[in-house]
Image (cartoon, coloured by chain):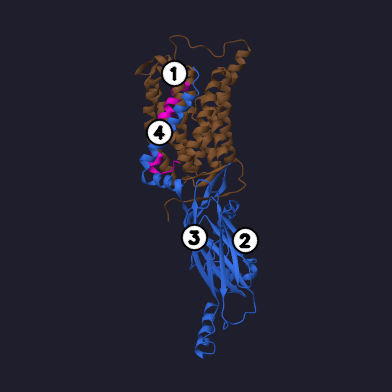
Chain colours: A brown, B blue
Amino acid sequence: MQIYLPIAELPISILTVLGLSGAVGFISGLFGVGGGFLLTPLLIFLDISPAVAVATVAAQVAGSSTTGVLTYWRRRALDFKLGGILVAGGIIGTLLGVLFFNSMRRLGQLELVITVSYVTLFTIIGGLMLYDALRAMLRVRAGKPARLKRRGGTHPWWMGLPLRMRFPHSGLYCSVIPIALLAVVIGFIGAVLGVGGGFILVPALIYFFRIPTAVVVGTSLFQILMTMTGATLLHALTNQSVDIVLAVLLLLGGVIGAQFGGRAARNLNVESFRLLLALLILSVGLRFAIELFIAPSEPFSVVLTEGSR
Amino acid sequence: MRWGLRLVAMLALMTGASASARAETLIAAMSSHQIQITSNYTGSQLTVFGVVERDGRTVARADPYDIVVTVRGPPRMLLVREKERLGPIWINRTQRRFPDSSLFLAVASNRPLSEILSPETARRERIGLEHAQRAKDSSLDLDVTTTRFQEGLIRILSEKGLYSAEERGVTFLSSTVFSAPVDVPATAPTGSYAIDIVLYAGGVPLARQTTNFEVVKSGMEQSLASGAHDLPLLYGLVTVLLALLLGWLASVVFRRD
């Protein structure tokens, strides 16, 4: 069954969209990532223009993270204080990212910047996480504890910087500076790549700040909800590229998928959770690497330049 | 050649021998002048009908009539980029702009264009996929690189069904009545489409006729699209609220504890 999308200006199969968004929603609920980094390339693959894909996915991610936020909130696995700092830093990062985005577009190398960033970011983060997850698994097999427990009073140097703050929900006593810096970086990357940044935030909070996984996922979803709500409004106001029909279809699939994902996350042990997320991120990086390194079968591409009639 | 024809015509007028000898006229009509996009729109088909009108005094032709129908979509600026190898990676390096080109172009004829007219005439008359979108007064040859980019453009858009060249797209129902179907895929842009119909005999253009149709959004599609442009804040807020509402609804529906 086909439906015509009023803003994307093409017909699309309803079942395809529901299936795709359902699958991405499941992953989103499972890992606490927005899923935008998976959904956006998939929509572009379906011939939807990148501008419409990025803007509409923002709306979808906002909706599907709402479900997650509510679920984690009820389970008290959400740190609003930490989330607030992340959102504030994220706004600054987003503004910087938009400036960078526009200057690269003027230079005509935006596409290259996006592809190269996807490859480096996803491959490095995915690779590091995979390495860590495999090492932890080997330790378990050898009969040792999965990772060295954090001992009271010891902490990495960045947590001891000035302006220390208590985050009781996260069991964290840490300087605000590295957290705000992380949020700025994520906002920046999010604006340039059109992704929520959950896939960076989740491992960063787990590895650099040793926050319990459940709280990390809830808080990350909260940050994503705030950022993506703002992004949707911004896209609607500046370039009118949010397709409401596509957004509703993606949401229907996404929220249902996220429910099952969130439920599955409870039955998944921490080590396999990390291993799976690492593999997922790594495979997206490799997918973009193929585009960059393999000779294209069609070297030409056609784009419609905006506003040049 | 055009000058030659004019000269012949002028001579003919001056001598008065065939002052009343008229050339053929072309009469054409569309099955519809508007395609409306609704939510179940998956493309459409229009038909161009035409009659070659001649009266008793029209000179007899040794060659049969040929018809070439060219449909051009709304003109835009198209950018074609080529990926090239730079060290180990492939990136877009060179690009060419194609002004006044469209994302939709269809050329239909009753037999292969090479049998209807000479390459020179085709170029001058802007007939065929490679000539149809050239500037009207440019007689210059495209340079080698631009030609390669143009071939890329035609190849890509043909694969998407947006560009087409139908060698048997025009059917003569009788010796003077013809019809040509025009397939408009769902991905074709909205806007005004121009149809150019040219009558040939023996490689010489005898008459031409232009008509047009438009592709517009209607009903819900139209209100949503204009809402997005005219009331962007409201549209954005509605989208966000809808998203949050669906998210909340899902958590209520699926709540177990």
Pinpoint the chain carrying mark 1.
Answer: A
Asked whether the residues under the numbered discs 4 and 2 touch, taking CB atoms below 8 Å apart as contact, a structural biologist would say: no
Query: Left or right: A305 with respect to A12?
Result: left
> Which of the labelled discs sits on residue B166, or is there none?
2
Nearer the observer, disc 4 or disc 2? 4
Q: Magenta includes A85?
A: no
For the magenta stretch, what is the residue range? A215-242
Estimate the x, y position of residue A308 in percent, counting from the top left: 42, 54
Residue A142: % across, % down: 63, 12
Above or below: residue A254 compared with residue B233: above
Residue B85 picture location, percent across and down: 58, 46
Relative side of B78 to A174, left or right: right
Q: Which residue is mark 1?
A: A74
Q: Main secondary structure of the magenta part?
A: helix
Q: Are marks 4 and 3 in contact (CB under 8 Å)?
A: no
**Residue mark closest to the camera, 4 vs 3:** 3
Identify residue type, mark 4: Leu
Q: Position of residue B130 (x, y in %)?
A: 57, 62
**Residue extending furthest top?**
A152
Q: Nearer the viewer, residue A169 or A21?
A: A21
- Which chain is indicated by disc 2? B
Q: Which residue is mark 4?
A: B241
Nearer the observer: mark 1 or 3; the answer is 3
